[in-house]
Image: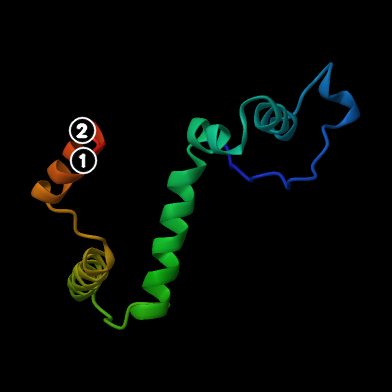
Amino acid sequence: MEVIIPPPKTAVASTQSVLVPSVRDRHIAEIQTKGRMAWQKSTGYNKRSRAETQIGRWKAVIGPKLKARHFDNQKTEAKIGVRVLNRMTELGRAQVRAHCMKNAVDRVASPKV
């Protein structure tokens, strides 16, 4: 597994990129040809970014370390923390109802003249 670090927007390929391209050079070339979003999807960077965000949430809400001393209690503490974060994420997610979506599709499919 290789570490994926997004190059800055102003990144330029190295002089050896033609003969022996580094991982960074390949990333820069792919971003230039396909775009940054396509690069993130192809390298899996977006998943890494989501995981880092979730760890940041954990540390902000739960704390930087577990409080329990024994392993079984630490597992329980972690399970509770995961449930809390999942519940918070679920509460912040927009709810879309099926009949609302159907009405929106119907309006787009048959516009009024």
* Along the line of sight, the residue nearer the viewer: 106 or 95: 106
Observer able to see residue 25? yes
In the image, farthest residue toward the right:
15
| Mark count | 2
Which quarter of the figure has residue 13? top right
Relative image position of residue 82 (x, y in whole percent)? 24, 66
Observer able to see residue 63? no
* Residue 12 versus residue 9 in the image, above or below: above
* Along the line of sight, the residue nearer the viewer: 70 or 96: 96
The residue depicted at 84 percent of the width and 16 percent of the height is: 19
Tell me the element at label 1.
helix
* Residue 100 versus residue 44 in the image, above or below: below
Q: Amino acid at mark 1?
A: Arg
Q: Which residue is mark 2?
A: 110
The residue depicted at 43 percent of the width and 45 percent of the height is: 47
Q: In screen coordinates, is 73 left or right of 23? A: left
Tell me the element at label 2.
loop
The residue depicted at 20 percent of the width and 33 percent of the height is: 110
The residue depicted at 67 percent of the width and 24 percent of the height is: 33
The reply to whether the C-beta atoms of the residues labelled 1 and 2 are less than 8 Å apart is yes
Is the residue marked by circle 1 packed among few (<14), some (14-19), or many (20+) residues within 10 Å?
A: few
* Residue 75 versus residue 103 in the image, above or below: below
Q: Which residue is mark 1?
A: 107
Instruction: Determine the CA span between mark 1 and mark 2.
Output: 5 Å
Q: In screen coordinates, is 58 left or right of 2? A: left
Relative image position of residue 21 (x, y in whole percent)? 77, 24
Relative image position of residue 30 (x, y in whole percent)? 65, 27
Relative image position of residue 52 (x, y in whole percent)? 46, 58
Which quarter of the figure has residue 66? bottom left
